Image (cartoon, grey):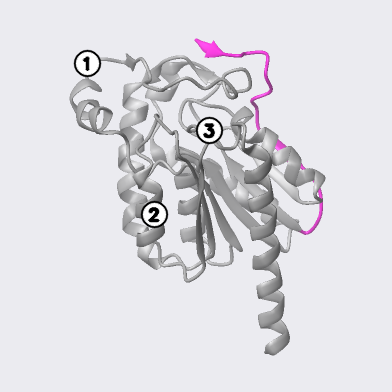
Amino acid sequence: MIVNPHLEGDTFFWAGGQVGVLLSHGLRATTAEVRLLGRILHEKGYTVAGPLLPGHNTTPDELNRTRWQDWTATMEQAYQQIASRCQRVFVGGESMGALVAICAASQHPEVAGILAYAPAMRLTTLPRLLLPLLAPFVPYMNPRRGPRPHVDAVWQGYSVQPTRGALQLLHLQREVSRRLPGIRQPILIVQGRLDATIDPRGAEELYRQIGSPVKELHWMENSTHCVALDQELPKVAELTTRFIARVIESAAETQRMQ
């Protein structure tokens, strides 16, 4: 039931400089979802890490047995590891991974910035209404998405949507929404205009609701849900590196003025 099992999808940690980037994959996926972006950032000199979240790269049944707190706990362990060797750490993720990263930032005000790629703040209407009804009785659903010619060969994950695992995403969405007003770190939001997996308006909700005084929202006009894998990945990587550089320079300028 794993699509593209030949791809690398386990936890990774690539040592680099004193600025770290911690990236989380989304629901059903593996670290293959953020590896391409991670490699670009590592080539720029950053220390980059990506944990494999519980319930993923095993079986859909295993994902149905996990809770959103299991994902955030794994992200916390990965954060402690990268923070122990880096002076500044940015946390980010794709889809559900963006929500996991936001939770980490809410627990650690010292986090330098947040990188949210296609944040799964809102599902499309039908899954959002059906999941609570189906999850107790139907273990899997076929995921709804449009064609992804630039993504399908490099994405790894379950071919089905485990319903109880997806229901945990709804719980995570509510938890993240509750925390947003108190989050102050700079945030970069990148959303694909052709996203058919989630409701793209969730990116706008995140931009409005988060308490960050420094925030950016960029639309990738030719990208689907997996903006960290799709054809505009070079642009996404460029936006990311520029954002990180600006945040670091702004922090250094603040320190010089003190």
Q: Which of marks 1 and 2 is nearer the N terminus?
A: 1
Q: Residue at x 53, y 33 (%)?
A: 226
Q: Residue at x 52, y 26 (%)?
A: 29
Residue 144 locus on image (x, y percent): 36, 21
Q: Residues within 10 Å of mark 3 (few under 14, many from 20)?
A: many
Alpha-carbon span between mark 3 and mark 2:
18 Å
Quarter holding the C terminus is bottom right
| Residue 90 falls in image quadrant | bottom right
For residue 209, above or below residue 26: below
Query: The disc labelled 1 sits on which kind of residue?
Result: Phe
For residue 252, above or below residue 232: below
Q: Name the residue under label 1.
A: 137
Residue 37 locus on image (x, y percent): 67, 39
In the rendered structure, the answer to whether residue 32 lies left or right of residue 26 reads: right
Q: Name the residue under label 3.
A: 226
Point out which mark residue 206 bears: 2
Q: Residue at x 49, y 34 (%)?
A: 26
